[in-house]
């Protein structure tokens, strides 16, 4: 067995005795019990497994554990801080920007990465950032409205 | 279908944990024409000593929002706040029997039973309070779970206090007196979804999120194409891998491992040889001839006057043939299940729309009595009819029984495409006619493959004939699965998307031929007041201006009646005539669904239906060659994306006189038609095949000749 892979998840250091080619999605969902990161396609085409790695949106289904060594991973479970929801989470609830909820973690994390670099994106920029996140229930219009509300409200998403 | 086991009084207290239990029994409450619940109990709820109310329902939550709207109904009739309701759904040990969650029926048919149980509970609690407070019942009022004396509110007692120590069970068989819409405090008001917090924080659990000690992940050997036969399989390389268990039982060949990625590696190490089916089979173009040419009897589903004779008298006759390809459900959550065998019982957590029928199928596969099988349904990551299929739950149960370990079967995306029971390809031929005054005189509809739903339109046409063949598998005893190279099944508003596309396209082309504005043409043939009002509401909100099509503005209209609701939409599109690409700019959709239990939730369903409908209308068509499914990923199968979604305005046409009707399906039924009509208005080219891809739009433009 190779040396353990050390990285941080939702602010907590973790050390996993796993092969570096193990995919991040299974480490999160299995070893770490963080099942909010969803499997939808295994090929990076749906975005349900999106997490933030050092603040950048990434597909956990395509990311190998070896690639996150020494880095910070944020999953949906770490977005709220001490019971306080992130403004994006609040806005998704308020705007009814979810139905089945399976794509929601990936939607929120992708939006969070966008707003971190572009606090006041245009509608076109939001659409471009969200384009590869799939939602089958048809909540797109409300998801856009929720992101726009946070962007317009000036409430920074938790850093 | 096995008989559900009888609930006893003791069962209820065990399941509900004491307190006050009210159940509604018998089929007495079922609306006329409603599916009859074979169980003796339709709905029940329990009030605990903490004042919390638990509602038990065999329905499941797949995004459509019934967890919230059913809780609203119970809260309204009981006189408690929405937040004090806990929903237990889709658990076959704890919930009353239910046939499944589909057909926009939860609110229509389960709703009345639940409301009656809650209304009866309110009566029971008020009677207990009257005794406790020593006042006549008439002097009591209920608010937020507190019963108080009118004019003397300090004299009060809470539902929780009344339930404390009580072991009271009440059963009602007659319809209870329900609250009037004018008195509503919880129903009819938009409520934040009860599942929203869990879904934005990652706490909401789906079937693949369930963990049991010692569980193994299964990967199952799949045929390369449908109807291939397994000739031989060499499992030795997989069996030699560390920690791998190989299972081979009849048709089931699987590898199990404690790590999902290593289970996948073991699957890749299997060496299988398959006997391919002999003939190549149809493709997306040749399937239509197979559907129309099949030796099936056309069955008349509706007849009035003599459509054949009327044809000879018509001033103008219009003959059209409409086509639609196979469409995938493609929920973002693939099918998943975890099964555990312990103490002679099997428990299966499954993403299924039909927990009780799934229990029966598992029991049969495992040769167990149904009472020994428990199906628990966590949240579903989308269903749309596709999770009425439960192969994965049976597979997990079989593997758990064979291995003696808890086993998860969670499909990969390619399996989800391969084993989808697709929305069937379909053909509709329509022959219709106008008289000299521009009125539709006859209507001769023949449908192949789509089934009956959506064929019975509300237009006033004197001579009419509707004939069908090869309908949906579940509609007809002679399941015409052999028509299709793979399995087909119900897909959100099964068949209606195709049938309404044909009907509303045909109305539109006759309006154009008559030189009449398409909205006006429809209204000229509509006496139905609900349909007229919904159409007029949509048109007014859209800012419809009268003009015969094609007006080159790219506007269209369509309407339909479905699941007890009436729905109409106006849309505007922009068509790139060189490329054939269609951009949908705007859709206004109005719906009368009776009392809207959760108006915001109903609007979400309208927006969701229109958005999902963009797919079957413009881009989604399964590619296949016989039993070989060529689309196995989102890379080639195009779901609607953010850039595809227009501005959608959802309008609820108020109708508090009518009990709540179906909301999840009706809007999607008109999406294909309204876009086809808008494309015609933009280009003068009529689309007769779904989806209306750029290539097809381009071809129709080239063929229009003008």
Image (cartoon, coloured by chain):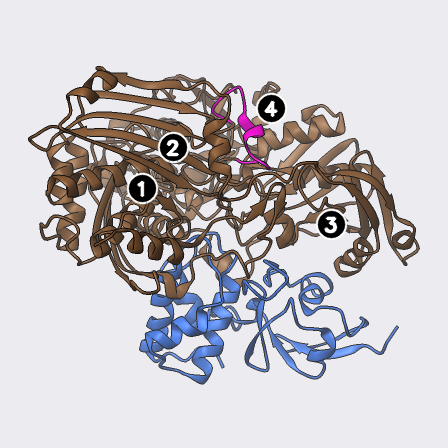
| Residue B93 in the image, given as x and y percentages of width and height | 62, 32
B645 horizontally vs B515: left or right: right
| Residue B37 in the image, given as x and y percentages of width and height | 48, 22
Magenta stretch, main secondary structure class: loop
Please name which of the two marks, 2 or 4, marks the residue nearer to the observer: 2
Relative height, residue B50 to residue B484 (above, below)? below
Could you say whether the residue bearing mark 3 is in a helix, strand or loop? loop
Q: Are marks 2 and 1 in contact (CB under 8 Å)?
A: yes
Chain at tag 4: B
Chain at tag 3: B
Q: Which callout, 3 or 1, points at the residue further toward the start of the chain?
A: 3
| Chain letter, blue | A
> Which disc is residue B597 wearing?
1
Image hue for chain B: brown
Could you say whether the residue bearing mark 4 is in a helix, strand or loop? helix
* Cα–Cα span, label 4 and label 3: 30 Å
* Cα–Cα span, label 2 and label 4: 25 Å
Span shown in magenta: B474-488
Could you say whether the residue bearing mark 1 is in a helix, strand or loop? loop
Please name which of the two marks, 4 or 3, marks the residue nearer to the observer: 3
| Residue B202 in the image, given as x and y percentages of width and height | 55, 61
Q: Which callout, 1 or 4, points at the residue further toward the start of the chain?
A: 4
* Cα–Cα span, label 2 and label 3: 34 Å
On the image, numbered disc 3 is attached to which residue?
Answer: B212
Same-chain check, marks 4 and 3: yes
């Amino acid at each position: 067995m190779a040396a353990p892979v050390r990285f941080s998840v939702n602010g907590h250091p973790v050390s996993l005795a796993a092969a570096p080619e193990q995919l991040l999605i299974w480490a999160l969902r299995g070893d770490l019990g963080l099942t909010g990161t969803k499997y939808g396609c295994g090929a990076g085409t749906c975005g349900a497994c999106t997490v933030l790695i050092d603040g950048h949106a990434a597909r956990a289904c395509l990311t190998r554990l070896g690639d996150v060594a020494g880095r910070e991973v944020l999953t949906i479970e770490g977005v709220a801080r001490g019971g306080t929801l992130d403004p994006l989470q609040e806005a998704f609830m308020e705007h009814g920007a979810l139905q089945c909820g399976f794509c929601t973690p990936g939607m929120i994390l992708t939006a969070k990465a966008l707003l971190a670099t572009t606090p006041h994106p245009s509608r076109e920029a939001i659409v471009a950032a969200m384009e590869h996140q799939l939602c089958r229930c048809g909540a797109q219009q409300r998801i856009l409205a929720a992101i726009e509300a946070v962007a317009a409200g000036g409430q920074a998403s938790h850093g | 279908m096995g008989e559900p086991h009888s609930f006893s009084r003791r069962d209820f207290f065990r399941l509900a944990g004491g307190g006050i239990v009210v159940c509604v029994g018998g089929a007495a409450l079922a609306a006329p024409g409603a599916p009859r619940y074979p169980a003796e109990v339709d709905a029940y709820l329990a009030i605990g000593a903490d004042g919390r109310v638990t509602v038990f329902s065999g329905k499941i939550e797949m995004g459509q929002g019934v967890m919230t709207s059913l809780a609203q109904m119970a809260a309204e009739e009981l006189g408690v706040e929405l937040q004090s309701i806990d929903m237990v759904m889709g658990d076959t040990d704890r919930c009353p029997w239910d046939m499944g969650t589909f057909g926009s029926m939860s609110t229509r048919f389960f709703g009345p039973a639940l409301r009656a149980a809650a209304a009866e509970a309110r009566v029971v609690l008020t009677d207990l309070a009257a005794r406790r407070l020593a006042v006549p019942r008439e002097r009591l009022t209920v608010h937020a779970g507190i019963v108080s004396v009118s004019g003397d509110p300090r004299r009060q007692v809470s539902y929780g206090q009344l339930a404390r120590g009580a072991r009271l069970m009440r059963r009602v068989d007659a319809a209870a007196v329900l609250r009037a819409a004018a008195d509503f405090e919880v129903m009819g008001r938009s409520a934040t979804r009860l599942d929203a917090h869990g879904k934005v924080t990652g706490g909401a659990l789906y079937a693949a999120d369930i963990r049991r000690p010692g569980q193994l992940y299964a990967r199952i050997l799949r045929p390369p194409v449908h109807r291939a036969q397994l000739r031989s399989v060499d499992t030795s390389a997989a069996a030699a891998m560390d920690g791998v268990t190989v299972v081979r039982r009849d048709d089931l060949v699987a590898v199990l491992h404690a790590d999902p990625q290593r289970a996948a590696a073991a699957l890749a190490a299997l060496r299988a040889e398959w006997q391919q089916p002999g003939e190549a089979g149809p493709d997306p173009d040749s399937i239509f001839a197979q559907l129309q040419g099949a030796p099936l009897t056309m069955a008349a589903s509706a007849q009035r006057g003599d459509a054949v004779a009327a044809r000879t008298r018509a001033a103008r006759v219009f003959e059209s043939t409409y086509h639609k390809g196979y469409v995938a459900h493609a929920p973002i959550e693939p099918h998943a299940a975890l099964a555990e065998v312990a103490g002679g019982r099997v428990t299966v957590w499954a993403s299924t729309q039909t927990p009780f029928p799934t229990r029966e199928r598992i029991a049969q596969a495992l040769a167990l009595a149904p009472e020994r099988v428990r199906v628990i349904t966590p949240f579903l990551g989308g269903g749309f009819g596709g999770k009425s299929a439960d192969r994965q739950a049976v597979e997990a149960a079989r593997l758990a029984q064979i291995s003696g370990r808890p086993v998860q079967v969670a499909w990969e995306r390619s399996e989800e495409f391969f084993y989808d029971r697709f929305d069937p390809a379909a053909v509709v031929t329509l022959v219709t006619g106008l008289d000299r005054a521009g009125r539709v005189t006859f209507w001769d509809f023949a449908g192949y493959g789509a089934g009956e739903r959506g064929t019975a339109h509300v237009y006033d046409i004197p001579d009419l004939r509707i004939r069908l063949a090869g309908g949906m598998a579940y509609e007809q005893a002679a399941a015409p699965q052999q028509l299709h190279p793979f399995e087909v099944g119900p897909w959100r508003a099964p068949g209606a998307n195709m049938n309404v596309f044909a009907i509303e396209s045909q109305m539109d082309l006759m309006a154009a031929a008559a030189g009449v504005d398409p909205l006006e043409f429809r209204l000229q043939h509509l006496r139905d007041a609900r349909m007229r009002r919904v159409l007029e509401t949509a048109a007014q909100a859209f800012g419809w201006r009268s003009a015969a099509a094609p007006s080159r503005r790219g506007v269209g209209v369509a309407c339909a009646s479905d699941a007890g609701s009436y729905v109409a939409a106006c849309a505007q599109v922009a068509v790139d005539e060189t490329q054939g690409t269609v951009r949908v700019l705007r859709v206004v959709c109005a719906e009368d669904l009776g009392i809207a239990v959760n108006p915001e939730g109903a609007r979400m369903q309208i927006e969701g239906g229109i958005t999902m409908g963009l797919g079957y209308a413009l881009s989604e068509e399964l590619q296949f060659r016989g039993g070989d499914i060529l689309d196995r990923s989102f890379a080639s199968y195009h779901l609607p994306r953010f850039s595809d979604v227009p501005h959608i305005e959802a309008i609820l046409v108020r109708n508090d006189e009518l009990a709540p009707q179906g909301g999840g399906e009706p809007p999607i039924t008109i999406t294909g038609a309204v876009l086809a009509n808008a494309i015609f208005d933009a280009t003068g080219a009529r689309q007769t095949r779904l989806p209306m891809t750029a290539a097809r739009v381009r071809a129709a433009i080239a063929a229009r000749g003008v």
